[in-house]
Amino acid sequence: MPIDNSISSLLRSPHEQDRKKAIAMLCRCPDRAAIIALQQTAEIDESMEIRFYARKALAAAKNARRPKTENPLLMLLPETLDTATFLRFDDDEKVTLIKALIEQNRTSSLPCFLELLPIEQNTRVLAAMIMAVGAFGSSAESRVLIPFLQHKDARVRANSIEALELLGNLKLFAYIFPLLEDTDNRVRANAARSLRSIEPFTSFRLLQAMISSGRTPFQASAIHVLQHFISDASVALVAPFLDSPQEDLCRRAAQTIRKLAEKGVARAVELAATLPPPEEKASEESEFSELDTQACSVEECIARLEQAFAIPDSRKRLEEIEKECLQLGDKSVLPLLKYLDRETDPLVIGKIYILLGRLYDERALPCLMRGLRSQDDRCRANAVEAVGMLGEAKSLMQLVPFLKDPHNRVRGNAILALRAIKEVDIEQPLATLVDSSEELYQRTAVYVLAELQRVELFPLLQKLLHSSFATVRKNAMTAVTALEKAGYSFKKEEAAVVGGEAESPQAIDTPINAREFSEAEQPQIAGESLHIEPPELGQVAFKPAPDIHASASAAQAGSRSSSWSGYFVAVALIALVVAVIIMVRVSIDVSGDRAAKELLLSAAMVHAQDVNDKGLEVVAGIALLEKQSSVVQQQIEQLSAGALSAQKILDRLSDAMAAADEASAEVLRVYQILDQADDVISGHCREFARIVDEARRRLPEKQHPFTGLYDTARTSTELAAMARIKDDLQTVSSAIEKLPQTVNRAQSGLPDESLFAREFEKFARLGNSLPEAESMLKTIDERIAVVAKESAKTSEVMQTLIKVSPGHEMVTKLEDMNRSLEIGQQRLKSCHESLAAVVGQALNIAPEKEEKVLLETLQRVSGEIQRSGKVLRELPEIPALLAKAQARIVRVFAILHQKVFAETVRLGLAADASTNWDAAVSREARKIADLYARAHALNDKITSENALYFPDIELMTIDEELQAATASSAAATLHLANATAFYEEAVENSQPQTTSPAKKN
């Protein structure tokens, strides 16, 4: 529902206290309109203090939006919704489920919807998912929703506009403006409304430019949209068209004046009274459909953009370029990229870089990368800012060198663009800016530090309080004052401010976002950058240098291969000789011809000598192969020992990360307990305040004002719950005392990333040596086969020779050779078994997790433990504050119970005087005294006699108790909101699938 007029007037007040009051009122009723208003205030308020205050209120309001729902589908869901569970429902159930999740503000389901958005086919489910992303997401999700503005289904387009409006991104004007000409009525209406709610200032300024353009289509669209900007300024822009010679513009102006008059704009009311009555009341459908007649085609818009490129005056050229880009949206990217090659004016080039960044199109990245090399400071600074807007991980890393750029604005923009990249150190570049002797560098440092709002960097901001430049000192004092008022704490020190008092927050110099020319001279799209997600680590695998020994081994293997090819040729020749011998033997005459026997002996001796010589070569090769195998085995054993050592080291590093993970989980558990206790106590405060107000209203008319307002049957249950909260507060209070030491110890025990690289290098060296070992095993297998074959041939030749000449000395040589070959074969088998065993063990040596996984775990754990340290600084005061509030709530419980019971007794006496009511009263007083003592967080006790006087306690006393409880609870809530902000910041700086543990489920 729309925001109350009183709140709207307070938001527009020039006084900061009024705007603070409006923010507090919006936070109490966090509906859709309130969330959007808080987002706008957090982005565009002129006061830094108000912006900080609105951001904290926005975080608290988003967490508070969780009304109870009875939807049975929610009973089927796990605490964190996953895609497998969601896909089990049919389409109708999915839509119902998404609505219920939005009602309960189940932000933990956001990663599931982000994963399913690209693949969902049912348009009803898709439209509902888009609304869920808008309800649960942040400006980082804008990039996910932008493509759905062009979806073929009108419901999806309309919901995309609403979702982007909820996200509150102030840079989406160029995407929403073309939807004023959409064919669907609801899409056009949503687009017109969101132009006012998302970007009121930029929108109004560009509408002024459209009115003054002289082009009928632009003027017609602008006149229609101005009915959504409720102010006298809108009337002033539209009024001249009441006398326009163009009937269409005149009619549109009259319609807009009447709309503004209906909304109470004074000047519009005066003009509407002078207008003739309309012939017939135009419906919203007809109004929006008329816009289609004025719509320009893409080709016409591109043609006008080309004409704008040719305008000689650079400032006028820029104004027209931006105006046409708003009509074209992302279709202007390619024309802009082509035109940049022709443009020579650095002012225009730099501004086009910003336009490309705000269009979120990665096709612009190559052009922006070239812009980073520009010699012009403005162009280079704008290119850095545009790359930061796009937020593409690899391109962001290209900005690291610009942390040392000589120009202050370039360096400042690089720091802001890289603030979310964990592996990039921005503190050192900031310190360099702070320590610089140049004023512009220091002024840039003040602005960047104020924008970053990081507690660990506050000492740098305090250092600038003592700058030698008066402007820097004033700006630093302004920033510190605003941060302190917003709830941040600084170490006390005397800041010498020369030249008078600190200026207001709006006096801070902003060299990073300083306008390049005046508002009147150029229209521009206002806004900040989208969240820049950090790039993933561990994507590049470690590749060690080639091993010299491996190369040598390869050469030796080639030599051995050549040698063995000769062996096989010799074996073939031997086989041929054997065949000849067999043929000769067959040819011997049974009669034992002497000449034939001599021929057979001669042939056998030749063959035997060849076999013996070959055997000698084979035996000699066995020894060489044994030596080579021993060298390889020794190398594998050494590398395996190193890998085993690395495995143990990685286990210790994993244990350190697990300890840090446990410490972070304990901090989260303590935070959640306190958060839940605060929710319960705050709820009771609101409930009892309502009861007291209603009882006060009844008092003049009813003798028993509390009867019916409070159910005494719930007292026992509620006080038992209060007793559990008491125990929880005592438990977490004890834990909070120990946690700082635990967190510090866990944080100091976390390893450096270089340790992982060093230890995984040992596994890499072992892995690189295994192919050589496996090649050696294959060579041994081949040599064993050759030796076996050679042994068989030797045995065969020896048997043939024995038949021809048993006593020949060659028979003895062949026997010795055969025995040597058999022994060599056994030695090779033993060598193979030994090396295979070592290789088998080496293959089993591997890290439990990949280096990429461990590095990602280290990054996550490091971020969580660092965040836990920040959260811990907010927690120590909370248990005591909640204990005070709980104690007062317990007392109010007892008082209300006794009051209602006393009224019941009085009614009972009137109805039945015979009952022993005194005994009942005493019994109830003892019961309340016992429950009170067990539940009271401050261990206060009352007697049954004290409880008898509770019915006489006045409403004013109860009201004072509730006010004190509310104040303590509110103070605790503020600390919890700070802690919640740290958790939410982690979600924004993390990957899309990460969920915030701080978000309530």
Image (cartoon, helix red, strand yellow):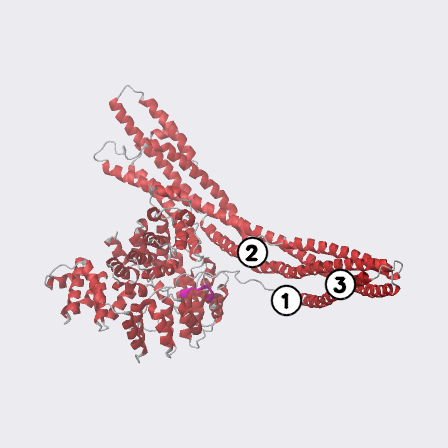
Question: Label 2 sits on what residue type?
Answer: Glu
Question: Label 3 sits on what residue type?
Answer: Ala
The mark found on residue 546 in the picture is 1
- Residue 317: tell me if it is visible: yes
- If you read the primary sequence from the N terminus, does the residue marked by circle 3 or circle 2 appear first? 3
The overriding secondary structure of the stretch rendered in magenta is helix
| Residue placed under numbered mark 2 in the picture | 850
What element does badge 2 sit on? loop
Mark 1 vs mark 2, CA separation in Å: 22 Å
| Residue placed under numbered mark 3 in the picture | 575
Q: Magenta residues, as a range?
A: 389-394
Residue 393 among magenta residues:
yes
* Quadrant position of residue 616: bottom right
What element does badge 3 sit on? helix
Residue 303's x, y, as percent?
A: 29, 75
Mark 3 vs mark 1, CA separation in Å: 44 Å
- If you read the primary sequence from the N terminus, does the residue marked by circle 1 or circle 2 appear first? 1
